[in-house]
Every structure is written in structure tokens, then in C-alpha cells.
Amino acid sequence: MKFKPANNIQDLQYFGEFGGVNPSISDSSTYTFLSAKTMFDTFEGNTDGCYLYSRHSSPSNLYLSEALAAMEGTETANVSATGMGAITPTILQICEAGDHIVSSRTIYGGTYAFLKNFTPRMDIETSFVDITKISVVEAAITPKTKMIYCETVSNPLLEVADIKALSILAKKYNLQLVVDNTFSPLSISPAQLGADIVIHSLTKFINGSSDTMGGVICATTDFINSQKSVIDGASMLLGASMDSMRASSILKNLRTLHIRVKQHSKNANYLAKKFEADGLKTVYPGLKSHPSHEVFKSMMNEEYGFGGMLTIDTGSLEKANALMELMQERNLGYLAVSLGFYKTLFSAPGTSTSSEIPLEDQKEMGLTDGLIRFSIGLDNDIERTYQMMNACMKEIGIL
Ligand SMILES: *Cc1c(COP(=O)(O)O)cnc(C)c1O
């Protein structure tokens, strides 16, 4: 049967304490035990359904975690305070001193900085490769490699990883395939294609209202338990746990994710086609001109489209900045980092979200000065939006 992520979320039911339609929020950091023996067993990880301390887990966090596990089709999941709070403990749980990682070179700036500048301190080395070239990925694998790391749709260049092919490679060399799926929730389900661990920054599309941060690791029960271990679990010990109030609000927003993703995709697809027809260098996985259009199509849950992210190249940083300022003035969106908001957001990644990446590396990966990354909003009348953006582009002299 075809995998239906939104149905899986919808089918999970948690009632509130008094039959409320939403589950009650667990407003406690610590929990009482009826007997000292149960407390000991819980510390040992042996008592299902017992809560210990909210850095470990809380009912509200479990509700959200289970809904996200249902969305990705993994055994379970564990939410965290931020996306980076999911990524860093996953890497540190799998790798130790002497280990090696093969990572896509086009990844979120924070993840790149962590792998490039931070983990070498612990003697964990990373090779950054073009993830779309499977033979290049394979050539980078050494006897010390423990993990292949990538984003389904990469930030900010929107390169698409062939998850099936990468998972075959990971299995061949006995590696963990870790996939950040932040840019393509619902559209692509990496665990169904063979990824071992799927991560999201909930801060983006999944929460969708730019009012909070959050992250999640979706994986096997064994892996999540190891991360939550009080003895040596990276999530438990590094401490980036989510607060219950936030878990509760993100779960409510998750209820409308399928509607939002469809609208983001519809609007982005419309604009990408128009921009390309106008002669702008446009990157969007839904365009036939996208080098990985067919790969995306082969992986996607069709009804959700190609996602809400697109880029255009304006030719220079000056033009990119002028266009973004004018679009903001005309209320077409906000000059802001992040994504997945109801309003269109735009930024020039070279000087913002990817500024951690050295200039020569930016050039090498095709991250140009004039690049603008758009997270297309939920505009009701996208044709009007297009007309207004087109007018801005003409005024700035891009068209
Ligand atoms: C934002 C983002 C992250 C980091 O998430 P935070 O919630 O900001 O910590 C990781 N990966 C991708 C692809 C992102 O866009």
C-alpha cells in the first residue's frame, strides 16, 4: 500500500485529561513515583509509561514525537529544542573519536560549521562531497566512515539527494544514512526510501508560524532509547530538550501541515514556472530544467508537490539586495532567514544563512552572490503576487 504520511498523523488520537479534544499539557518538570523500586527501574530504562524528569521525556513531548514518527513511518522519534539540537546529538551518538563522515557539501550552514569546525576537535573528520554523484560519495568512504549525511533537498541550492541509491550504498558499507528532511516534509518520506534516521527542524514548515524553535529525530526504538539513555545518551546529556508547552503548540500546528504544504508547493510551482519563462535563472525541483527533477519525482508523495523553496539568480549581490528591499516595501514578503512561514521569506544565502561556508567553497558549489532563496508563502492570489514581483524585477533592472 502507498505510504500516506498525513493519514498516519491524523489517525493518532490523544485526548485531554477530561476528554479534551487536544491532549493535556504536562506542566511539570518532575514526576512522583508510588514506590522507590519503580524509580530505580525507570532510571534503568525498564519501566514503560513512567516519566522521570522532563529532560528525558514528558507526555506532551511523546505525543508530538509519536505524531512525527507516524509522519515519517519510523518506529519512534524524539523531539528536541531546536533542529541543531536534533542534528548534533545524532552525529555524536553515532560517531566517536577516529570516525569519519561523508556529508553532502550543500547543507544547512550550522550543520556545515559543526562538521567542519567543531567535530574535528573530537577527532571526527568529514569529507564534503557532491551528494548527487553516487560514485563520488562511494569513493569518499573509508574504513573509518560511520555515516552518510545529507539533506533530501539541500539548503540553499535545492540539490536533491537520491535517497534510495544512497541507502543501498550505506547498507553495502554498513553505514548509517542520516537525512535532514526539513525542506520537504510530507513531499518526501526518506525512511520509506531506506534512510536510517530522519531529522527535521520543526522551526520551519512543520510548525509553520515562525513563533518557536524545535527539532526531531525519527528513528528506530533502539536508536532513540540509546540517545535518551541517562548513562551515555547524547540527547539526554547534551540537554537540548523541548519544553512541553512548545510540544503542545507544535502538535496543534502539525494538524494543518498537509494543507499548508500543498499551498506552498502550488504557489512555488506557479512562480518558478513564471520566473523561468521570464528568462530568470530559476532553481525549483518541480521544473523540468532541474537536474534532479526526475529523482525528486521518483521519490515524492505526489499530492504534496515539489515544496515551497525556490531560488533565483539576480546576477549580483547589489541587485539581490535591491530586489529584496523593494519586495519587502511592497509587502510581498519579508527579508528574513528561515522558511515555512505563511508569508514569503527571502534572503541572500551567501551573506546570511550560508556565510559559515568559506567564499571559495561557496563558489565551488555554485552558491553565487546574486542568489536569492525564497520560501514561498501561502498567498491566496499567487497570480497577483507574481505580477507585483515581476514589476519589482523590472524596476530593479533584472528583467
Ligand atoms: C533551520 C535548519 C536547521 C537548523 O534548525 P534550527 O531549528 O534552526 O536549529 C537544520 N537543517 C535545515 C535544513 C534547516 O533549514
Image: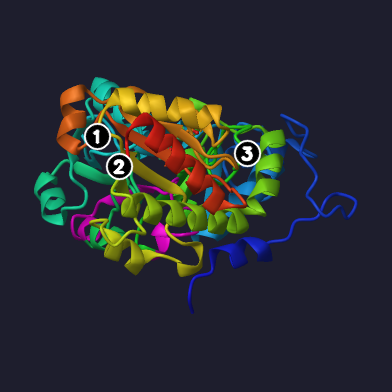
Q: Which residue is mark 3?
A: 209
Residue stretch in magenta: 169-192
Q: Which residue is mark 1?
A: 367
- Cα separation, mark 2 vs mark 1, equals 7 Å
Mark 1 lies on a secondary structure that is loop
Which of 32 and 147 lies nearest the eye of the viewer?
147
Above or below, 11 against 48 in this view is below
| Mark closer to the chain start, 2 or 1 | 2
Give the residue at x 67% y 54%: 255
Give the residue at x 39% y 58%: 190
Kindly indicate the quadrant of the structure image that contains residue 60. Answer: top right
Q: Is residue 130 visible?
A: yes
| Mark closer to the chain start, 3 or 2 | 2
Tell me if 30 is positioned left or right of 237 in this view.
Answer: right
Q: Amino acid at mark 3?
A: Ser
Please identify the quadrant where the C terminus is shown: top left
Q: Amino acid at mark 2?
A: Leu
- Cα separation, mark 1 vs mark 3, equals 28 Å
Mark 2 lies on a secondary structure that is loop
Kindly indicate the quadrant of the structure image that contains residue 112. Answer: top left
Q: Are marks 2 and 1 in contact (CB under 8 Å)?
A: yes
Q: Which residue is mark 2?
A: 157
Above or below, 248 against 110 in this view is below
Give the residue at x 54% y 41%: 202
Which of 180 and 284 lies nearest the eye of the viewer?
284
